[in-house]
């Protein structure tokens, strides 16, 4: 289930868009907003492998080697927090509304 | 668990609390009770142990210490990057240093991030290298790099013999109770133990005297070293609450790639040096990224740790050595 908590912990204003880049051990934009039915794409442009893993199990990428990507389609409204399981300090959110 | 092999299949097995082939007997056959005191001095920023009455630094084999073991950590086999161009070589150097201590440790604990990407090839290399360690037994706990996306399934195929759940276990030797914990298989932004493991610990310590020294192993720190970087365990407070009645609790971890010590109540926490590359001190960089040191300086940030315990005492003595 997606979290319904506001993104106050990140204190980051959502950015409209469905493209997220992984660079320098960070997801950018860190918080994106999309409409239901949108496919969000993550691109690993870092020198290290990462994952895109939902905090609640809603989605989970394989290990993304440098240059690899991952996509997920969000059908239901909610706030979806995620992290990299290899580097759990890397966090982000997708706000679907 | 399947396909597990002891790193020292010919050696006598310690007895571990576990559901996969081992009972709780202890490492007694591997431990010896000696008699001389070991004292610690600090020189050049390093804690150096000496046998009491002997002016020489000591790794001496005729020590009277009841138990000596070694902690190594964060080898990241498979890592490729400028921070360490040959992680296998530095891990091999750490193993050589263990084998050159002048005594055979009762066991060696690798406190996680054995591999970099949870690959079978990386685990296989680690297992092969660890077989060269001169000790009756090698124990491990998994790091988050050992459990990527599989809750530790691959890790346990190589290192899970005799463990419970995601890989936790306990054992006793020389009057010390050791608990090896897994806090990397269900983490979010922090490490996490989970209810099953907390229940295991509750049952595990229920029959122990409060005078029993307790040693905890985990990969991620069991204290809030720097939560902004995930350097903490979300439910560690519950764990430590169960151990509050014990006079001496020592928690040894890896993950942060630097030596660090903190005492909270009856618990003293020690983070270990890695064998691969250093990370920044907490908050001293935008993120905990591998630090590339000037040529020739890498080994000064790497190391091994020797831990000794004396009969009749409750505390443990730690010696952190830089890699040479």
Image (cartoon, coloured by chain):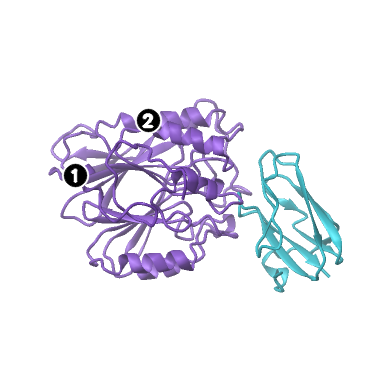
Chain colours: A cyan, B purple
Residue shown at 43% from the left, 47% from the top: B111
Q: In the figure, B125 relative to B205: above or below?
A: above
Left of B185 or right of it: where is A57?
right
Count of numbered tags: 2
Residue shown at 43% from the left, 31% from the top: B129
Left of B258 or right of it: where is B78?
right
The x, y position of residue B11, in whole percent, is 29, 38
The x, y position of residue B4, in whole percent, is 43, 43
The image quadrant where one finds the C terminus of chain B is top left
Front residue of B290 and B284: B290
The x, y position of residue A45, in whole percent, is 75, 42
Numbered tag placed on residue B132 in the rendering: 2
Nearer mark to the viewer, of 2 and 1:
2
Front residue of B43 and B100: B100
Residue shown at 56% from the left, 59% from the top: B187
Disc 1 marks which residue?
B65
């Amino acid at each position: 289930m997606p979290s319904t908590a506001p993104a106050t912990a990140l204190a980051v204003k959502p950015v409209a868009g469905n493209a997220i880049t992984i660079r320098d051990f960070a997801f950018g934009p860190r918080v994106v907003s999309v409409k239901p039915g949108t496919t969000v794409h993550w691109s690993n442009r870092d020198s290290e492998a990462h994952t895109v893993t939902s905090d609640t199990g809603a989605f989970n990428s394989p290990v993304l080697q440098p240059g690899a990507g991952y996509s997920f389609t969000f059908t239901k409204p909610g706030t979806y927090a995620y992290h990299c399981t290899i580097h759990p300090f890397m966090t982000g959110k997708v706000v679907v509304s | 668990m399947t396909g597990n092999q002891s790193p020292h299949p010919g050696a006598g097995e310690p007895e571990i609390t576990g559901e996969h082939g081992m009972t709780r007997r202890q490492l007694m056959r591997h431990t010896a009770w000696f008699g001389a005191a070991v004292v610690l001095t600090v020189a050049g920023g390093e804690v150096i142990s000496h046998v009491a009455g002997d002016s020489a630094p000591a790794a001496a084999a005729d020590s009277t210490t009841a138990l000596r073991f070694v902690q190594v950590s964060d080898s990241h086999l498979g890592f490729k990057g400028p921070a360490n161009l040959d992680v296998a070589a530095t891990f091999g150097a750490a193993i050589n240093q263990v084998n050159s201590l002048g005594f055979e440790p009762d066991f060696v604990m690798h406190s996680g991030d054995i591999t970099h990407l949870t690959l079978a090839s990386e685990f296989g290399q680690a297992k092969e290298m660890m077989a060269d360690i001169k000790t009756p037994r090698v124990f491990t706990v998994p790091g988050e790099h050992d459990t990527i996306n599989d809750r530790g399934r691959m890790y346990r195929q190589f290192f899970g013999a005799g463990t419970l759940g995601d890989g936790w276990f306990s054992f006793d030797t020389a009057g010390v109770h050791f608990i090896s914990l897994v806090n990397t298989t269900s983490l979010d932004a922090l490490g996490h133990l989970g209810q099953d493991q907390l229940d295991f610990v509750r049952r595990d310590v229920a029959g122990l005297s409060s005078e029993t020294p307790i040693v905890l192993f985990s990969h991620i720190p069991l204290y809030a070293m720097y939560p902004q970087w995930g350097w903490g365990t979300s439910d560690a407070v519950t764990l430590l609450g169960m151990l509050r009645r014990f006079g001496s609790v020592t928690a040894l971890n890896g993950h942060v790639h630097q030596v660090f010590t903190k005492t909270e109540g009856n618990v003293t926490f020690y983070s270990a040096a890695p064998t691969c590359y250093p990370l920044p001190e907490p908050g001293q960089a935008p993120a905990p990224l591998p630090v590339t040191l000037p040529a020739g300086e890498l080994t000064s940030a790497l190391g091994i740790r020797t831990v000794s315990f004396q009969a009749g005492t409750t505390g443990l003595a730690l010696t952190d050595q830089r890699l040479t």
